[in-house]
Image (spheres, rainbow, N blue to C red):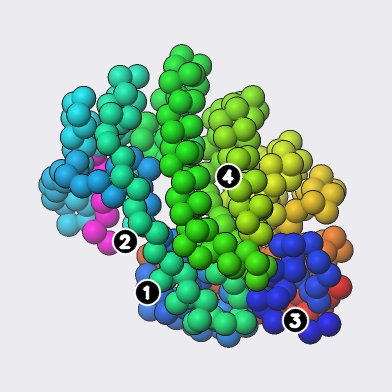
């Protein structure tokens, strides 16, 4: 069996026989802007040799949708490196404010204050008249034409729970899960309904036809904010499983497949994700960041979903070449044993604006040895 990258990834996702594990460099997109010129060598090698897994989306916003005139942005330079950005959200029930520090050099930013600071702020968010964005599939079809058989295109979505966390921060999310549980759940449910309507519109606009072609994949990041240690397993069931399941059922009924990213300790949740209808779970972190080995994760999944990941980004940033090669070989050997595996690092390959030599060396090792071992430990 000699498959194209597109065929390989889709067959892994769908649980069909394949020739070997797939190898993905997370964050890789054809023609993308590089954070630093030194990433070019990694980009070129990965574009040529790995299985492309590219995400695109259609405009969507949980809070205002396409409605305009609610936001006011105030910028205050703080230093050569940082700018303070205050965003005012003018709702019918009052003004909300969020302040972030934005890096002028490409570093991650910092949120200083969130829009939601007390229960009444949720009511202010929900007082905003919501107007859905019209769906555009232009970027989706453009990317499909560009990568051809070299990979797949995933239609990327937001996540209701993650959107709520961004509005209030992790501390308040945890507190509200106890003190304002019904109000918190109501906000997540409203956002989830808006997302379902967005997906339905995308399916009606033409993505439903891709389901018939058996290469339709939706994906999102977010459940990691609804699991321990921040929230409880009960919270995950109520705020994620029960709320996301109708969306996932809709996607499956249209012939689509689902990729989910969830960092952290997911050992007790693998069966839950499979039961929800997840087709690929990423990134299956090994201990100590995770709490389950790849071997045991495959046993928990029991063939019901594919697993993706198992290489921590900090290993790529800091490990010796010998250690990284060993980690790659172990992951690929295990994945090949169980059959539904995509090798992937746990975060975007351009994780820092100015990559050190160790990181660049290890990214090249990851791509070269990932592909080499995937071909060696074929099915």
Q: Residue furthest front?
A: 204
Q: Residue at x 52, y 76 (%)?
A: 144
Measured as percent of width and height from the top left, residue 138 is found at: 41, 71
Assign a secondary structure to mark 1.
loop
Asked if the magenta segment contains residue 102, the reply would be yes
- Name the mark on residue 33: 1
Contact check, label 1 and label 3, Cβ < 8 Å: no
| Dot 3 or dot 4, earlier in sequence | 3
Structural crowding at the residue carrying mark 4, measured as other residues with C-alpha within 10 Å and reported as few (<14), some (14–19) or many (≥20): many
Q: Mark 1 or mark 3: which comes first in sequence? A: 3
N-terminal of the pair, mark 4 or mark 1, is 1
Q: What residue is pinned by disc 3?
A: 3
Residue 361, above or below 341: below
Element under disc 2: loop
Front in this rendered view, residue 323 or 29: 29
Q: Is 217 positioned to the left or the right of 85 in the image?
A: right
Magenta residues, dominant SS class: strand
Which range is magenta?
99-105
Q: Residue 51: image x %, image y %? A: 63, 75
In three-dimensional space, the C-alpha distance between marks 1 and 3, rounded to whole angstroms, equals: 29 Å
Front disc: 3 or 4: 4
Residue assigned mark 4? 247
Q: Mark 2, residues whose alpha carbon is within 10 Å: few (<14), some, or many (≥20)?
A: few
* Image coordinates for residue 174, horizontal then vertical, percent: 48, 25
Residue 106 badge: 2
Q: Earlier in the sequence, mark 2 or mark 3?
A: 3
Separation of disc 2 and disc 3 at Cα?
Answer: 38 Å
Q: Earlier in the sequence, mark 1 or mark 2?
A: 1
């Amino acid at each position: 069996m000699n498959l194209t990258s597109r065929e390989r990834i889709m067959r892994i996702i769908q649980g069909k026989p394949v020739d070997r594990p797939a190898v993905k460099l997370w964050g890789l997109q054809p023609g993308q802007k590089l954070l630093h010129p030194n990433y070019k060598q990694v980009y070129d090698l990965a574009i040529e040799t790995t299985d492309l897994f590219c995400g695109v989306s259609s405009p969507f916003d949980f809070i205002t949708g396409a409605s305009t005139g609610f936001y006011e942005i105030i910028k205050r330079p703080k230093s050569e490196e940082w700018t303070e950005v205050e965003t005012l959200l003018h709702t019918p029930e009052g003004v909300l404010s969020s302040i972030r520090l934005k890096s002028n050099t490409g570093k991650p930013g910092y949120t200083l204050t969130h829009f939601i600071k007390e229960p009444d702020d949720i009511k202010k968010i929900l007082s905003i008249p919501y107007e859905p964005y019209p769906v555009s599939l232009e970027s989706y079809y453009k990317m499909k034409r560009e990568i051809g058989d070299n990979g797949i295109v995933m239609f990327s979505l937001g996540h209701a729970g993650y959107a709520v966390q961004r509005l209030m921060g992790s501390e308040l999310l945890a507190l509200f899960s106890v003190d304002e549980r019904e109000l918190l759940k109501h906000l997540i449910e409203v956002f989830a309904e808006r997302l379902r309507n967005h997906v339905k519109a995308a399916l009606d606009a033409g993505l439903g036809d891709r389901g018939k072609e058996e290469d339709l994949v939706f994906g999102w990041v977010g459940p990691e904010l609804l699991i321990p240690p921040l929230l409880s397993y009960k919270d995950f069931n109520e705020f994620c499983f029960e709320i996301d399941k109708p969306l996932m059922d809709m996607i499956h009924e249209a012939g689509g497949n689902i990729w989910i990213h969830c960092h952290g300790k997911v050992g007790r949740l693998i069966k839950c994700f499979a039961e929800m209808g997840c087709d690929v779970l990423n990134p299956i972190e090994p201990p100590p960041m995770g709490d389950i080995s790849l071997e045991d994760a495959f046993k928990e999944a029991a063939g019901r979903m594919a697993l993706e990941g198992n290489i921590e980004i900090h290993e790529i940033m800091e490990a010796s070449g010998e250690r990284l090669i060993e980690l790659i070989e172990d992951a690929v050997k295990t994945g090949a044993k169980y059959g539904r595996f995509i090798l992937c690092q746990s975060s975007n390959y351009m994780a820092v604006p100015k990559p050190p030599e160790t990181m660049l060396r290890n990214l090249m090792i990851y791509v070269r040895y990932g592909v080499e071992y995937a071909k060696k430990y074929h099915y």
